[in-house]
Amino acid sequence: MTFYNTINEFRLEDKLCDAVIRVDGVDFNVHMVILCSCSSYFRDLFRSKTSTSEQQVYTFSQVSPTTMSLILDYAYTGLVVVTEENVLELLAGADHFAIKGIVQACCNLLEQQLNYKSCVHIWMLAGSHKCTELRQKAYLYILHHFEEVTEHSEKLLQLSVGQMADLIEKDELNVRQESAVFEAILRWINYAPEERRGHMATLLSKVRLLLMSSKYLVNTVMVNALVMKSPLCRTMVIHTLNTLLKSKTRRPLTRTRLPSAVLLAIGGCMNDAPTNRIHLYNVRADSWVTVNNSREAPRTFHGCVFLNGFVYCVGGYNGFKYLRSVRKLDLVTQTWQNVGSMRLVRCYVSVVALDGCIYAMGGCNKSGRLKTAERYQPDTSQWTLIAPMHEYRSNASATTLHGKVYICGGFNWAEPLSTAECYDPHANQWTLITPMGNGYDSTLAVAYKDQIYVVGGLRENSHTSRVIAYDPQSNQWSMVNHMINPRSSFGIAVLEDQLYVVGGLNDYGTISKVERYDEKTNAWSVVQDMEVPCSDLSCCVVERCPFTAAYLS
């Protein structure tokens, strides 16, 4: 039996106790030395103890008997059960008595509870209890999910004008359109209009009016009653409109907001040779930059996934040989390292991430096309073979949806495939789904809006702009609006609820064209071209981090 088990038994049996903690009429017999070991508050309190042979009684009104019982259990056992029901009172009590272990346990639970409704309350709560790390995480959550928070959190409407101004002036405020900031200001003022309408100019000065369209400024901002009543607000809007008018077709330079996530296009072929370049797309500035990646070897016909803060590059071709190696990019330290290699060499491989694992399927080696598949577990850095697919596939397209892996099309020994199949990890089983119709080589798939979108591809030496969508519930395919540009061997990703296609090949060669599809409008639109043409690249979306922050304008 350990010392702490023994001393806890002594407490429960009221043996050798030298103090009494009294809370709301309930007495707890304790050993002062045990409380001193976990709390600077009790150390300071008991140091001032007057010498006496009798137990001294210390009365507290800051906590309930239930909370004090939990605190004492932690002091004697090092364990505490934090729940949604007790976390707020327990945090307050642990903060008052300076018990860092319980404070951290409460912060861990509150961090798990961060959502659109709770984040502002948790931010304010963390501030009042000096939980610096939790406060920063909650603050970043508010910034990164600002539009959703403004819709769901009443606590946001209870912020002071200073707190609101501090939020909306930040570069990190994640809004697709600057109009969302203006509308958030109106909601905040309308929550208490009598006392807040005088703050309109203060808050409007934090809005980046130059990022708004002239139409929105004229039809919405300028005619707003609060703006019209404020000479300072009217001056700001008129000055912005004049600046936009003078700039004519070119929008004047102004600082854009920073996105919470960016799109990375990694590797591929440039000038008919593999490249090690990483291209980064900033959705706020609609701009591409090239990330320095000079120490990494070139790689093409590979797969990339983002998992647990790392980017994994799997298989492919380096200009000399087909690869089974896997490289991992740490986005915090900005360094690459080798991890466990696949069981088989795989070029033209299909790669996805699901439930903390990476799946590599099909592809080809020197012997030909493959129907095998394997799974990588990061905690062991090991690959294991899973059930083989029904078809031999290279240049296929794969994605995940609702806990399953889907792989579509590709090339077998003789022709492009129209078949598609689905893998259930729990059953370790592949199931053929409804074929796509015509087969296309070098097409790409992505999960988008609860469906599997299969885009572009190559058939009979001709590139297509075809887009089809598979609904798992009906097991049926349907046509979607075609892309603007036919292409194959491109990159694909979903960023901020829009589907992006990047680079690739068309009937005339390698292209740098980028476009995106919005399911709400059922339309494709042109996006800023990549800096250079590139094909056979692999795309993934990553959170903003030290690796990407330096390249965001």
Image (cartoon, rainbow, N blue to C red):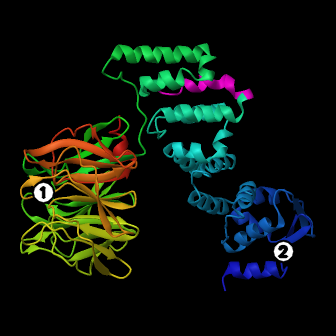
Corner quadrant of residue 72: bottom right
- Dot 2 or dot 1: first in sequence order is 2
Corner quadrant of residue 40: bottom right
Left or right of 8? Residue 152 is left
Q: Nearer the viewer, mark 2 or mark 1?
A: 1
Left or right of 246? Residue 337 is left
Q: Badge 1 is on which residue?
A: 458
Q: Quadrant of the C terminus?
A: top left
Segment colored magenta: 194-208
Q: Quadrant of the N terminus?
A: bottom right
Query: Is there a contact, CB below 8 Å, between mark 2 and mark 1?
Result: no
> Is 337 contained in the magenta span?
no
Q: Badge 2 is on which residue?
A: 17
Q: Position of residue 296 (x, y in %)?
A: 20, 53
Kindly identify the amino acid type of the residue bearing the numbered disc 2. Cys
Corner quadrant of residue 395: bottom left
Q: Position of residue 141 (x, y in %)?
A: 53, 48
Please name whichever residue, 302 or 54, is drawn nearer the observer in this view of the structure.
302
| Helix, strand or loop for the magenta stretch, by majority | helix
Count residues near mark 1 (Cα–Cα under 10 Å), then give few for <14, some for 14-19, many for 20+.
many
